[in-house]
Image (cartoon, grey):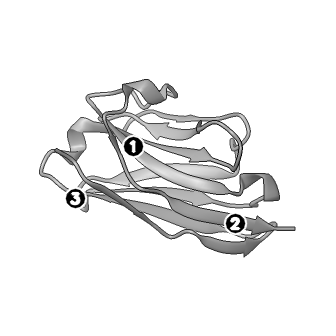
């Protein structure tokens, strides 16, 4: 069982930055691919970024490439999402997810564990 707790959300002006953190319980964090998804009001949950369980490969949605960076610190059981040059369309609840021995791909169906989410609001 893995428990995920997100933090770091908040209100920021367009062009600003935020860093989200997701702390995981358990001793086998390094065996999980981690990803960030987001869901805006009235929209489906969408993939934002993922990182392979071995930490070597990262994946991004086209809408965030060049602005967001996913990283992980296995010693701290934590995955991060650095978000720069934020836009109003980035406003959503952001969720982290874990997939045992996964690749960090964009399919939500492959992720076994989910956090409860953190709100990110970008004002124009």
Give the image quarter of residue 11.
bottom right
> Residue 37: x and y, percent?
54, 43
Label 3 sits on residue: 75
- Left or right: 44 in relation to 124: left
In the picture, the disc for residue 50 is none
At 25% from the left edge and 62% from the top edge, which residue is drawn? 76
Label 2 sits on residue: 121
The answer to whether 29 is drawn above or below residue 119 in the figure is above
Give the image quarter of residue 64.
top right
- Left or right: 43 in relation to 93: right
> Residue 89: x and y, percent?
79, 52
Q: Secondary structure at mark 3?
A: loop
Q: Secondary structure at mark 1?
A: strand
Q: Nearer the viewer, residue 109 or 54?
A: 109
Sequence-first tag of 3 and 1 = 3
> Residue 3: x and y, percent?
25, 53
The answer to whether 70 is drawn above or below residue 20 in the figure is above
In contact (CB < 8 Å): disc 3 and disc 1: no
The answer to whether 107 is drawn above or below residue 4 in the figure is above
Label 1 sits on residue: 97
Q: Secondary structure at mark 2?
A: strand
At 23% from the left edge and 43% from the top edge, which residue is drawn? 30
- Separation (CA) of disc 3 from disc 1: 18 Å
- Separation (CA) of disc 3 from disc 2: 30 Å
């Amino acid at each position: 069982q893995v428990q995920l707790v997100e933090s770091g959300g908040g209100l920021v002006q367009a062009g600003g930055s935020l860093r989200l953190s997701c702390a995981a319980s358990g001793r086998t964090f390094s065996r999980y691919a981690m990803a960030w998804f987001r869901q805006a009001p009235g929209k489906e949950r969408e993939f934002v970024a993922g990182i392979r369980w071995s930490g070597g490969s990262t994946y991004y949605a086209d809408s965030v490439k060049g602005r967001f960076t996913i990283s992980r610190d296995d010693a701290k059981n934590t995955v991060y999402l650095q978000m720069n040059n934020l836009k109003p369309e980035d406003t959503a609840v952001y969720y982290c997810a874990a997939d045992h021995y996964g690749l960090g791909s964009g399919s939500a169906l492959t992720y076994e564990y989910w956090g409860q989410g953190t709100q990110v609001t970008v004002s124009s």
